[in-house]
Image (tube, rainbow, N blue to C red):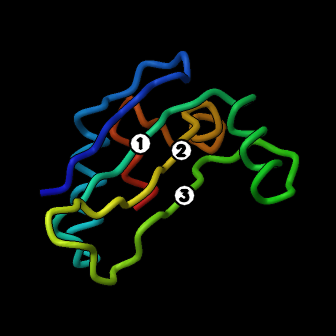
Amino acid sequence: MIEVEVVNRSGSEVDEAAAVELAQSVLAGEGVGAGELGLAFVGSDESRALKREHLGVDEATDALAFPIDGLGEVPDGMPRQLGDVVVCPAVLDRAGVCPRAGGARALA
């Protein structure tokens, strides 16, 4: 089972259940059947700061991924740590993709 922990610091209303369903579907399609994923919805300022810090680009972005474990073996009894995905609803809205209306599917 893929467990998804969602936090919403974006200040926007987000359909968290649909986002979890999408994440689980995409991961299953990639052959990942079990693990733990963090999914954070953030505002433009936080998105911009993360992109600047990790990619050296000073602009907000729609989504960033921070993987941890690859698809290799993990020790018995330890869940696969898939990492974190950070999504900025404000950038998606500007691009005409609204995650509150299920538009986060465009990220798949």
Specify whether 93 is left or right of 83.
Answer: right
**Res 39 label:** 1
As rendered, which of 96 and 90 lies closer to the eye?
90
* Contact, mark 3 vs mark 2 (Cβ under 8 Å): yes
Residue at point 47%, 64% (across, down)? 68
Residue 45 picture location, percent across and down: 75, 28
Picture quarter containing residue 42?
top right
**Res 30 label:** none
Q: Earlier in the sequence, mark 2 or mark 1?
A: 1
Looking at the rendered structure, the kind of residue marked 2 is: Val
Looking at the rendered structure, the kind of residue marked 3 is: Ala
Residue at point 80%, 49% (across, down)? 53
Q: CA distance from mark 1 to mark 3?
A: 9 Å
* SS for callout 3: strand
Looking at the rendered structure, the kind of residue marked 1 is: Leu
Residue position for label 2: 86
Compared to residue 36, the image places residue 69 above or below, namely below
* Contact, mark 2 vs mark 1 (Cβ under 8 Å): no
Q: CA distance from mark 3 to mark 2?
A: 6 Å
Compared to residue 53, the image places residue 13 above or below, namely above
* SS for callout 1: strand
Residue 71 picture location, percent across and down: 34, 80
As rendered, which of 55 and 26 lies closer to the eye?
55
Specify whether 64 is left or right of 44.
Answer: left
Residue at point 82%, 45% (across, down)? 59
**Res 65 label:** 3
